[in-house]
Image: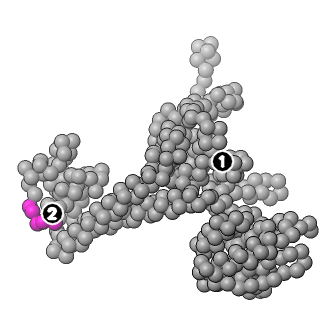
C-alpha cells in the first residue's frame, strides 16, 4: 500500500503511561513516557526533533486530552481515533503492539479522525456539559422529593403542575414546620389561579409526616435550592463566553422547540464552522441521528440509529418533543405523519434529525429559519394521495354523490 506519511507516530494512551511508536519509512523507534506535563513535553521535543508529520492516538476516556493540549500548543498535527476503527488482531495485544499497529495504520492513511474542536470550544463544551449534568441531578432530586411525599401520603403533585413551584414550596415549608393547614392559610400560600383548587389541595396535603420524613424532605429541598443556585451561576459563566455565538443563538431560537439554553448546548457541541461536515448527512451521522445501514440481498431492513454525540442527540430529542406540540408547523406535520406507522420514539428521532439538518444549513449558509408549514407534504404527489384516500373511502362503503343520485 502507498504511504501517506513518511514520518509519523502512533501512541497507545493510558492513565499513568504512554507508549509511542515513531515510524520513518521502514524504520521505527519505540519509547515509553509518563503522563505528567514535563514528561509530555519531553515526548513533544522528541517528535519535533524527528520532524514528525502526523500523530495518532486512541480516544481513551479523557486521557488523550493532556497529550492533545501539548501537541496543539507545540504546533504538532495530531488526530484522535475511535477505538472501534483501529482494533488490532485478537490475541496479540500488548502496549507496544498497539502503538505499532496505530503507527502502521496512520502511515498508510487507514485511520478516520474524530472531530476535535479548538481549545476554546472544548472549554465551552465542558461548561455546557457540566450545566447539563447539574440540571439532570436536580431532576433526580425532584423525583426523590416526589417519592418521599408519596410515602407520607401527600398527593400534592396530583393538583399542581410543578412540585418545585412557589405555591408548592410554601405548602411544603409549612408542612415541615408542623403547621396544620386550613383554607384561610392556603389562600395566603397559593397564588390566584390555584385558589379554585383549594378543596382538592386540602385533601392532598392531609398526610402522615413523621419527624424523620420532615428532616429528609428538608434536606432534599435544600439540595434542590443549592443545585438551582449552581445552575444559575453556570448560566452566567457560560453567557460570558458566548459573545461570538449570539447571532447563531438568535437564529436557532427561531426554530420551533429550541430555546436559548438548548441553542447554547447545541452550538457548544457543533461549533459555528460547518466546513468540518461536508454535508448534512455527515453531521447527522456524527450526532447519532442518522439511520444505520442494514441491507442484504438488495433489500433494506429496519435499523437502529448510529452511535454518536450523546449530548447533542439527547438535546435535540428533547427539543423535538417540544416542537411536535406546536400545531401548524412542519415538525408537527412530520410527527403526525410518522407516528401512526413508526411509533412515537422513531417519529421523535426523525423530527430531531430534521431539526439538525435545518440547523446545519442555517449555520453553513447564514440564513434564518424558514417555516415550511403544516401542508408541506401535501404539495407532493397529490394525485397518488387522492387515489389512496379514495381507495380507503371505497373500502369503508362510501360512494360518490353523483353515482347515488343517478341510481
Q: Residues within 10 Å of mark 1 (few under 14, many from 20)?
A: some
Secondary structure at badge 1 equals loop
The tag on residue 175 is 2
Q: Is tag 2's residue or tag 1's residue first in the polypeptide sequence?
A: 2
Q: Is residue 253 visible?
A: yes
Residue 348 position within the rendered picture, expressed as x and y whole percent measured from the top left: 55, 49
Q: Nearer the viewer, residue 351 or 23?
A: 23
Quadrant (top left, top right, bottom left, bottom right) of the C terminus: top right
> In the displayed structure, would residue 29 be above or below residue 277?
below
Q: Residue at x 78, y 84 (%)?
A: 30
> In the displayed structure, would residue 94 be above or below residue 196?
below
Q: Residue at x 73, y 57 (%)?
A: 293
Q: Which residues are magenta?
A: 175-180
Within the image, what quadrant is residue 211 found in?
bottom left
Within the image, what quadrant is residue 232 found in?
bottom left
Q: Is residue 146 visible?
A: no
Q: Mark 1 — residue? A: 274
> Looking at the magenta stretch, what is its main secondary structure?
loop
Q: Residue at x 65, y 51 (%)?
A: 284
Q: Nearer the viewer, residue 80 or 311?
A: 80
State how far apart marks 2 and 1 are (Cα): 54 Å
Quadrant (top left, top right, bottom left, bottom right) of the N terminus: bottom right
> In the displayed structure, would residue 43 be above or below residue 395?
below
Q: Residues within 10 Å of mark 2 (few under 14, many from 20)?
A: some
Q: How is the image coloured?
A: one colour
- Is mark 2 in CB contact (under 8 Å) with mark 1? no
The tag on residue 122 is none
Residue 179 included in the magenta stretch of the image: yes
Residue 32 position within the rendered picture, expressed as x and y whole percent measured from the top left: 71, 85
Residue 277 position within the rendered picture, expressed as x and y whole percent measured from the top left: 69, 50
In the displayed structure image, the side of residue 390 where residue 298 appears, left or right: right
Q: Nearer the viewer, residue 107 or 405?
A: 107
Amino acid at each position: 500500500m502507498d504511504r501517506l506519511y513518511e514520518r509519523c507516530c502512533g501512541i497507545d494512551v493510558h492513565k499513568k503511561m504512554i507508549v509511542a511508536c515513531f515510524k520513518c519509512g521502514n524504520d521505527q523507534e519505540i519509547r515509553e513516557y509518563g503522563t505528567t506535563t514535563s514528561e509530555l513535553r519531553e515526548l513533544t521535543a522528541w517528535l519535533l526533533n524527528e520532524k514528525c508529520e502526523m500523530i495518532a492516538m486512541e480516544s481513551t476516556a479523557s486521557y488523550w486530552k493532556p497529550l492533545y493540549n501539548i501537541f496543539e500548543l507545540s504546533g504538532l498535527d495530531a488526530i484522535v481515533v475511535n477505538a472501534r476503527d483501529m482494533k488490532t488482531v485478537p490475541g496479540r495485544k500488548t502496549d507496544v503492539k498497539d502503538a505499532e499497529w496505530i503507527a502502521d495504520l496512520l502511515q498508510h492513511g487507514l485511520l478516520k479522525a474524530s472531530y476535535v474542536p479548538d481549545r476554546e470550544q472544548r472549554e465551552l463544551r465542558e461548561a455546557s456539559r457540566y450545566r447539563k449534568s447539574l440540571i439532570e441531578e436536580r431532576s433526580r432530586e425532584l423525583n426523590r422529593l416526589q417519592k418521599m411525599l408519596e410515602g407520607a401520603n401527600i398527593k400534592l403533585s396530583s393538583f399542581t403542575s410543578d412540585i418545585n413551584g412557589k405555591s408548592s414550596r410554601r405548602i411544603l415549608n409549612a408542612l415541615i414546620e408542623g403547621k396544620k393547614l386550613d383554607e384561610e392559610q392556603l389562600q395566603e400560600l397559593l397564588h390566584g389561579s390555584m385558589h379554585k383548587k383549594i378543596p382538592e389541595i386540602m385533601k392532598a396535603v392531609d398526610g402522615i409526616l413523621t419527624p424523620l420524613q420532615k428532616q429528609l424532605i428538608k434536606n432534599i429541598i435544600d439540595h434542590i435550592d443549592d443545585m438551582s443556585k449552581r445552575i444559575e451561576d453556570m448560566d452566567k459563566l457560560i453567557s460570558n463566553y458566548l459573545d461570538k455565538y449570539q447571532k447563531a443563538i438568535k437564529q436557532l431560537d427561531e426554530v420551533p422547540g429550541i430555546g436559548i439554553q438548548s441553542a447554547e448546548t447545541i452550538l457548544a457541541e457543533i461549533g459555528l464552522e460547518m466546513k468540518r461536515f461536508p454535508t448534512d448527512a455527515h453531521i447527522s451521522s456524527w450526532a447519532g441521528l442518522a439511520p444505520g445501514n442494514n441491507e442484504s440481498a438488495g433489500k433494506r431492513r429496519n435499523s437502529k440509529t448510529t452511535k454518536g454525540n450523546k449530548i447533542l442527540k439527547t438535546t435535540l430529542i428533547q427539543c423535538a418533543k417540544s416542537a411536535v406540540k406546536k400545531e401548524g408547523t412542519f415538525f408537527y406535520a412530520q410527527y403526525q405523519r410518522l407516528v401512526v406507522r413508526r411509533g412515537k420514539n422513531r417519529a421523535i428521532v426523525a423530527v430531531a434529525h430534521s431539526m439538525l439538518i435545518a440547523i446545519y444549513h442555517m449555520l453553513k449558509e447564514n440564513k434564518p429559519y424558514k417555516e415550511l408549514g403544516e401542508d408541506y407534504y401535501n404539495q407532493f404527489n397529490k394525485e397518488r394521495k387522492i387515489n389512496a384516500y379514495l381507495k380507503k373511502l371505497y373500502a369503508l362503503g362510501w360512494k360518490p354523490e353523483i353515482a347515488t343520485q343517478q341510481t
